[in-house]
Image (tube, helix red, strand yellow):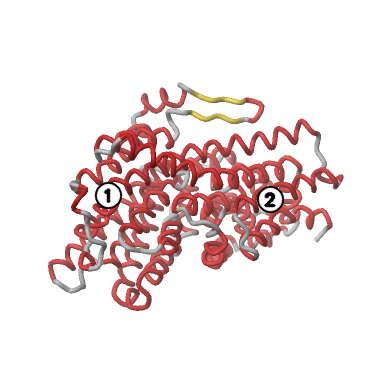
Amino acid sequence: MTADTVLATIPLFLAAILLIGLQVSSSLSGLATLVATLMTVCFFPKFQTSFPHLLLALGGGLAKSLTVFYVVLPSLLFYRLLQTSGAMKMLGQGLARLVPHRNLQVLFLVMGLAPFAESVSGFGVGTVLIIPIFIALGYSTAQSAVLGLLGQMAVSWGGLAIGTALAADLTQLDPNILGANTAVLMAPLPLIYGLIALFLSGGKKALRQHGLIAIGAGSLLSVSLGGFSLWPGIELAGILGSLGVMLFLLLWGQRETASNSCLLSNQQSPSLNRQTGLSFGQAIAPYGILTVLMLSSRLIFPLKIWLQHHFLISIPALTFELPLLYHPGFFLCLTALASTQILKISQTDFSQAMSRSWQQFIPGAIAMACFLGTSQIMQGSGMIKVLGQMAATLGENYQWTAPTLAAFGGWLTGSSLGSNALLSYLQQEVSLHSGLSLEWLMGAQNAASAHATIIAPARIILVTTAVGWVKGEGWLLRQLTPIVVAAVILTTLLLSLIVG
């Protein structure tokens, strides 16, 4: 390992030490990592860049932060409105009636609803939406956060598979075949995540009771993602696959209810606050509105085109565009406003919810902006290129490194879209020189980067901000990093079996 390679890893190791080892707050960790990256760029010739280019990199990080902020703040407001009105308790009670056993509720949320919401919208919305439901069902903040992040098992199909489509476009591959290859390389992971979710929620007893159901639901999701990627295509694969899983779990739950073979969780769930006067239909209506709005904006082509090209923030110098009306944040804002009427929220309660949301938002926003700024500076200064070149020297043995490099990209950028934009050309170049199959290298790139976003600083901060968990980032990283590392190793083994 050269000195330049060591220098290029400084921001990564510093972030890990501060967040995991020392449990420093995310905002201070982000600031320290950004400062360290700037010092590396300023004082070491290999990575020195002009001041205008440095400003552009910082501006690019701030611009990318806006796309995340546009989801986080309305999500926080939406959550606060549901909490204030008592709708969260009603949702917990309603889910207990639809899927009576607590184990099945966990599987329904983690393996069904979260992948569905993520497939529709992307940007971590699936996690943000199910965590409040876990809290309403009586799970602790820590349990809810971990379970919510485990629901990010279909990120490659998030936002109607925008990240997969970009990777296919950059490398001139068939996007549907790339989606199917991605599903193959991550095939065991949904069922493994389901089993982990069961264990976290109910221990060995939950595994004995519903372990086979978790395996069945995970297998169904994996097969569906691969099959639906081939037809009708990657855009709808995540939606259709997760809908199938939810239907399977609903039917199984009703079967168990009819045979009285399990202990019903509605005897264990938090009791409904009858003083709210809300029905289950009112409580779930905002989720229905959000789903309909998102699906309409993605599947009605004329509407999609219009939304993408009106009220567009464009900064050519930063290669940044933010379609305000097409972004999921806009539909979260509309849903939050609609919720005030549906849930009968007073102006005073709305103002208080907005104030609490803003107070939660600020520390997380600082951290996310710093980490995304760091990633842009590392890319602009050549640090990413140095790390990639080191990996590319492995030749045919690169198959053992490709998923790790992809995971690094997902961790750094906080999205499979960002990782694919960062590393797709490198994967293509290595494929040309090593003879390794580009279709399978990009499948590994897509799968590993998606799973690594679970522990990306931006995603972890999104979750801790959503639940108001101060300094919870280090604990989450310690719990989830071994799971993600194991997922990347498994993807590596599958890749080596296929291309080796």
Q: Which residue is drawn at 29% across and 41% down?
A: 286
**Relative to 9, does residue 193 appear above or below in the rendering?**
below
Q: Is residue 256 left or right of residue 482?
A: left
Judging depth in this view, the residue of 65 and 198 nearest the camera is 65
**Residue 410, visible in the rendered structure:** yes
Q: Residue at x 79, y 47 (%)?
A: 39
Amino acid identity at mark 2? Val
Question: Between tags 2 and 1, which lies in front?
Answer: 1
Amino acid identity at mark 1? Gly
Residue positioned most to the front: 348
Residue 297 coordinates in the image, percent (x, y): 36, 32
Residue 205 coordinates in the image, percent (x, y): 33, 78
**Residue 335, visible in the rendered structure:** no
**How many numbered tags mark residues here?**
2
User: Dot 2 corresponds to which residue?
Assistant: 430
Distance (Cα) linking label 2 and label 1: 55 Å
Judging depth in this view, the residue of 232 and 124 nearest the camera is 124
Residue 348 coordinates in the image, percent (x, y): 33, 37
Residue 84 coordinates in the image, percent (x, y): 32, 46
Disc number for residue 249: none
Q: In this view, does 283 lie to the left or right of 335?
A: left
Q: What element carries label 1?
A: loop
Q: Is mark 2 on a helix, strand or loop?
A: helix
**Relative to 472, does residue 371 appear above or below in the rendering?**
above
Quadrant location of the N terminus in the rendered image: bottom right
User: Dot 1 corresponds to which residue?
Assistant: 86
**Relative to 201, does residue 369 appear above or below in the rendering?**
above
Q: Residues within 10 Å of mark 2 (few under 14, many from 20)?
A: many
Judging depth in this view, the residue of 284 and 140 nearest the camera is 140
